[in-house]
Image (cartoon, rainbow, N blue to C red):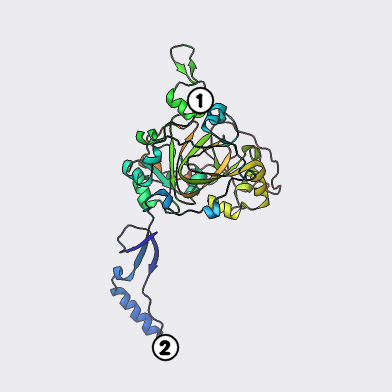
Amino acid sequence: LTITKSPPSTMAMAISTNRRRPHSLPKHGLFLSLFTTAILALSVDPSQETHETIIDYGNHNLEWEDGPSSWEEFGHDNDPSVCGLPVLTVEEWEAGRYWEGNTPVLVKNMTDGWAALNHWKKQEMIRRYPDAEATMGDGRRVGEVGPDDAGNVLSPTTVKEFITKNMYHPLKYFFDRKIAIPNGMLEDCHPFPMPTRAFLENPETGAIHALSKKKKVNPKPPFEIWQDHLAISIGSDLQGLSFHFHGEAWNVVLFGSKRWLLWDYARFEKNVTRQRHFALAGEGAPILSSAEWIRQLYSSPERMYEMRTHGHDCIQHAGEMMFVPRKWMHMVVNIGDTVSVISEVGLEKGEGKKPEDFEYDPDESSDDSEDWSEDNSEDWSEDDMEDDSESEDWFTYVNEE
């Protein structure tokens, strides 16, 4: 990180302030010292009194691979006893129609032939798509409230602004599911993985004739249809969304790596107590970032048991696709500077965001009355919950779906 100094008028983040202090004096001179100091304080030029030290959070490396990496701490070799996911070829993914199943899978070599492998290199992405819009925010909070209704948790940015000014800020993560991605960026990711590609090739895939027989309609509701929109994620080392779940989705990494922790929905579908004990340190505890959850909570016997018997802990490398089934709980940690694209069932192409979209306060507006008032004495108990199968875009760990 580059550290610079500037006068107080400069718009930048201050991280320390140094003020002049009087030298220590004998006790008998204390009154005179205080009086003199007060008089002098009125005449001191404020611009000479304070230094503001600011940090440049921009990524000024030549390539993504040149950034810092936490591989030694968070990387592993995907031992079957830890990861345990099927690893497929693209042909196997498509022939087996794994997106219709309920098992996470890794698919290798998904980016073969993608123009993005060249067009999305760091310098080339900035040159080609400097003004492509998105939002940035704290990955922990975005995972908590969901990116679509995050409101003032997010702030608007562009590809160039984020990379050159904000990428290494610990609370800035470039992620938005409903932005208006330039057509060029979408075309850079062809051929799209299935089933997203099927909609691109024929938007009427799966449609049938209506009763009037004048037009075809898809019998599935929009939130169950894989459409041709992609979301883009750019984040530095250790960034990533905290525990959440949503509809079926795939994520393809172009640069960098990701560590995934996935937990089977069946384990908490009817057990909110287990869900909370898994995600939080205890009653009233804050939501941790993904990296801190692994550092502080993962090693507990209960959580380790759940992940080893009902979950998966996997490393996704560049070129690979991770498929996450509907409502599987998951968190992600970037290892190194990471760029990926995501498609999710029901995700429609965005039209960009308006200023008022960032005025919404998800904390003040939330009607979530969940607290820790339920009986928590039965740790990892089988408390029955009704399963609400209505589709939602985003669920955090506290929702009783």
Q: CA distance from mark 1 to mark 2?
A: 83 Å
Q: Quadrant of the C terminus?
A: top right
Q: Position of residue 391 (x, y in %)?
A: 54, 32
- The image quadrant of residue 102 is top right
Image quadrant containing the N terminus? bottom left
- The three-letter amino acid code for the residue at tag 1 is Pro
Tell whether label 2 touches label 1 (CB within 8 Å): no
Residue at 69% across, 41% down: 383
Q: Earlier in the sequence, mark 1 or mark 2?
A: 2
Q: Is residue 288 visible?
A: no
Residue plotted at (55% across, 42% down): 244
In this view, 165 is above or below 26: above
User: Which class describes the residues within 10 Å of circle 1: few (<14), some (14-19), or many (20+)?
Assistant: few
* Of marks 1 and 2, the one in the foreground: 1
Which labelled disc corresponds to residue 28?
2
Q: Can residue 146 be seen?
A: yes
| Quadrant in the picture for residue 119 | top left
Identify which amino acid the numbered label 2 is placed on: His
Residue 116 position in % (x across, y down)? 40, 38
Residue named by callout 1: 221
SS at badge 1? loop
Left/right of residue 331 with respect to residue 213 in the rendered view? right
